[in-house]
Image: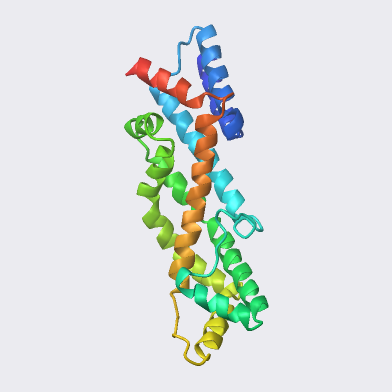
């Protein structure tokens, strides 16, 4: 009964912990179980703990991205003009239409921020289906192994979910309107080569790329925090119970 209570307390603690204190929670739970005679954490328990840790990281990433200025205020993931439209931006700024370009960039990032809130259930579904073998591969893999796992299992679903939300969000934030006005203005410039990149596809891909970058940063915190030693604890326990 004491072991069940400790495990329940451990899982409850994980649901509210951050990447910084995750290792301390795992270590404390492992020590308590050993002291209580319950033995070290099993692979099943560690697997559940890893899933919970990833879920916390995912929620942190999505919350950060979907907040006001989550994309716009983060230079690492901020959406700018599509690469093939950079000449459009440069030319319009040269002729005094920089304010119109700025309004488009703001609206574009607001669209991405609105879409980011849709990511959590998709990621959680992928994490729920993670096997012990998947977990061990993550623990013993590269520093971004968890992020790569989520990319493999979630990208298609994320793209399908993001595309209509991005489309709606771009319209709601007037990004589509601003972009249309910008392109039309540019295309009226004599001798300018006509451009009209697919804004929705570009914004969808960049929003997803930015979200995965935040996920990778959360994973790095979990793996490399000196006080946590999460990877060392989990690898030791998994190895001892194979």
| 123 w.r.t. 181: above or below | above
139 sits to left or right of 31: left
Using the rendered image of the protein, determine whether residue 241 is visible from the camera's viewpoint: yes
Q: Give me the residue at 58% from left, 62% from top.
A: 114
| 82 w.r.t. 238: above or below | below
| 49 w.r.t. 169: above or below | above
Residue 102 at what x, y percent from top left? 64, 72
Residue 236 at what x, y percent from top left? 41, 18
73 sits to left or right of 150: right
Q: How is the image coloured?
A: rainbow
Residue 27 at what x, y percent from top left? 54, 19
Q: Give me the residue at 44% from left, 61% from top.
A: 205
Using the rendered image of the protein, determine whether residue 1 is visible from the camera's viewpoint: no
Q: Quadrant of residue 60?
A: top right
In front here: 44 or 240?
Answer: 240
Q: Count the marks: how many?
A: 0
- Which corner quadrant holds the C terminus? top left
Q: Quadrant of residue 15?
A: top right
Residue 53 at what x, y percent from top left? 51, 34
In front here: 95 or 61?
Answer: 95
| 57 w.r.t. 50: above or below | below
């Amino acid at each position: 009964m004491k072991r069940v209570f400790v495990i329940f307390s451990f899982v409850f603690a994980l649901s509210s912990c951050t990447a910084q204190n995750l290792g301390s929670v795992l270590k404390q739970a492992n020590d308590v179980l050993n002291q209580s005679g319950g033995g070290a954490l099993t692979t099943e328990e560690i697997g559940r703990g890893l899933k919970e840790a990833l879920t916390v990281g995912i929620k942190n990433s999505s919350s950060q991205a979907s907040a006001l200025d989550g994309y716009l205020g983060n230079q690492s993931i901020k959406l700018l003009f599509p690469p093939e439209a950079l000449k459009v931006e440069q030319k319009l700024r040269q002729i005094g239409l920089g304010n119109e370009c700025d309004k488009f960039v703001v609206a574009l990032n607001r669209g991405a921020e609105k879409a980011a809130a849709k990511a959590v259930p998709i990621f959680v579904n992928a994490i729920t289906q993670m096997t012990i073998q998947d977990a061990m591969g993550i623990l013993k893999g590269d520093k971004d192994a968890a992020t790569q796992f989520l990319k493999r299992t979630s990208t298609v679903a994320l793209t399908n979910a993001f595309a209509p939300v991005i489309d709606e969000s771009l319209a709601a934030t007037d990004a589509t309107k601003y972009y249309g006005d910008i392109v039309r203005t540019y295309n009226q410039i004599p001798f300018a080569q006509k451009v009209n990149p697919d804004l929705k596809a570009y914004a969808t891909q960049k929003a997803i790329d930015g979200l995965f970058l935040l996920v990778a940063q959360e994973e790095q915190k979990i793996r490399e925090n000196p006080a946590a030693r999460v990877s060392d604890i989990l690898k030791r326990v998994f190895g001892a119970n194979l």
